[in-house]
Image: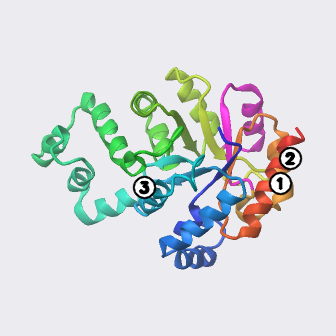
Amino acid sequence: MEKVLFGDNQFFGVNHMSEDKARAQAMRFQDDAEVIKVVDIACDAGIRAFMCTTHDRIGAICDHVRANPERYRDFVFYPCMPYAHKYANAVTEHGPVEALRRFLPQGNALSSLIKSGVSLANKDLASLGKVLIDAEMKMFHGLTTPVIFLQNVVTDLLLGIGFEDAFGIFAEHVKSKYGAEPGFITMNMPRLLEALERQGIDNPIVCSNINKIGFRMCGGMELYEETIRTKRFRPIAMSVLASGALTADEAISYVAGLGKVESIVFGASSAQNIKQTKALIDQHFNNI
């Protein structure tokens, strides 16, 4: 994996510490051209991986990258699916059955069953999951997607209800259909690793909050540190700055000092912050 991953929260008004800042960012990035400008700043700073949701607007970024192959010769996408708000809004507007049908390809057998009001048996859930993954991946056709992530909203929901087979279904499909490695985003890394082990998913890629004040780390810092030290997996750290509670230098120094974290994902909207964060990650990880 790339050591530095550029995230997309800032483009869609996501800020866990400040609603005012979130609104300001959402206003700034209403135009796709503004998003592309910031992605280009990250690219020019030496960041080659864009870890993004499957928000509908990401499709325009994919189109731009496809249209400029020389500019983005080594650029890769790490899709994170599903974009939960898209499905939640559809359910609110159309109801659960009609919302699900709208996300399935026309003519698909499962779509026809749902339209007819036939309930899905458990054996059909794997097929349904694969079709929905394929629908989310359409915008990335022709692009390089070495890792495909299951978003934490769904990961942790499946973990909570005990439907662990879904992790195996997801992992198998992204490997066989897309030649990609499965990744999992979670707010409960220790418990997720136990579930993935039961599914036979070896050395998984797991993205979770990792920071020196325990911000949104379910189970606490000590458990996370022990898990990173003793478990076989490839950790990706997010929220390393704890939504601005930590300085970049102290935050990245802590994560690098854990020794096994393979990548850091961060979002930023200014050239100064992007370049500074990239330089600090390079500095601290090179000093390990």
Q: Nearer the viewer, residue 113 or 135?
A: 135
Q: Residue 272's spot in the image, x, y percent?
A: 77, 69
Mark 3 and mark 2: span between their CA atoms? 34 Å
Q: Which residue is mark 1?
A: 280
Image quadrant occupied by the N terminus: top right
85 displayed left or right of 223: left
- Type of amino acid under label 2: His
Neighbour tally class for label 2: few under 14, some 14-19, many 20 plus, Cα within 10 Å: some
Q: Residue 252's spot in the image, x, y percent?
A: 81, 51
Q: Nearer the viewer, residue 10 or 119?
A: 10
Mark 1 and mark 3: span between their CA atoms? 32 Å
Which region shows up in magenta? Answer: 218-240
Query: At numbered mark 2, what does the secondary structure look like: helix, strand or loop?
Result: helix
Q: Which residue is mark 2?
A: 284
Q: Quadrant of residue 244?
A: bottom right
Q: Residue 234's spot in the image, x, y percent?
A: 66, 33
